[in-house]
């Protein structure tokens, strides 16, 4: 399935605006842009590839703002979108969000999956506590 060009172009524009807001530290505005983009995606949203990166952007932005429950929710949605289950970044951020929510067993599962797909380099710029959680399993 493909979105029509006008809708797709509008989604891309809104996501680019969201990314620019993140770079400027205006995360509330970024979230508004990402949500506006997501609103343009037809139902069911998890059937569309565009939703994968919109949910990921939302999850990442919420994570960076320490809104871990919202991050977790959006990252689970991203995981259920096309190619989400094979995306190491989604798995990493979801594992980190689960860790911060105190769900350590689930966090281990997703962090280990991220490690298996992309190795230690994925963890290089992250807090050491996340890799520490899985290092004995490797």
Image (cartoon, rainbow, N blue to C red):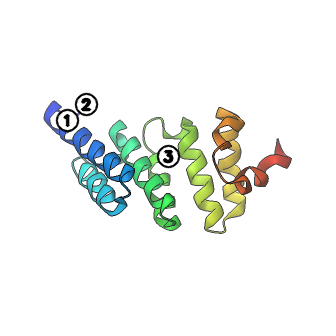
Q: Is residue 28 above or below residue 119?
A: below
Where on the picture, by quarter, is residue 5?
A: top left
Contact check, label 3 and label 2, Cβ < 8 Å: no
Query: Which circle marks residue 99 in the picture?
Result: none
Q: Earlier in the sequence, mark 1 or mark 3?
A: 1
- Return the residue nearer the eye: 120 or 91: 120
**Which residue is at 40% across, 54% downward?**
58
Q: Which residue lies furthest to the right in this view?
A: 136
| Circle nearer the N terminus (2, 1) | 2
Task: Please say if the residues under marks 2 and 1 sit with CB atoms less than 8 Å apart.
Answer: no
Q: Name the residue under label 2.
A: 2
Quadrant, the C terminus = top right
Q: Residue furthest left?
A: 6
Q: Nearer the viewer, mark 1 or mark 3?
A: 1
Residue corresponding to mark 1: 9
Quadrant showing the N terminus:
top left
| Mark 3 neighbour density, 10 Å: few (under 14) some (14–19) many (20 or more) | many
Q: Are marks 1 and 3 in contact (CB under 8 Å)?
A: no
Residue 120 place in picture, x, y as percent: 71, 37
- The circle drawn on residue 79 is 3
């Amino acid at each position: 399935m493909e979105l029509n060009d006008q809708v797709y172009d509008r989604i891309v524009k809104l996501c680019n605006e969201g990314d620019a807001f993140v770079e400027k530290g205006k995360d509330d505005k970024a979230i508004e842009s990402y949500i506006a983009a997501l609103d343009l995606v037809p139902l069911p949203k998890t059937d569309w590839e565009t939703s994968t990166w919109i949910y990921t952007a939302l999850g990442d932005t919420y994570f960076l703002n320490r809104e871990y429950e919202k991050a977790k929710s959006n990252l689970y949605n991203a995981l259920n979108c096309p190619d989400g289950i094979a995306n190491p970044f989604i798995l990493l951020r979801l594992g980190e969000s689960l860790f911060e929510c105190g769900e350590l067993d689930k966090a281990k599962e997703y962090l280990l999956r991220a490690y298996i797909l992309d190795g230690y380099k994925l963890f290089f710029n992250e807090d050491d506590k996340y890799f520490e959680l899985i290092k004995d399993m490797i």
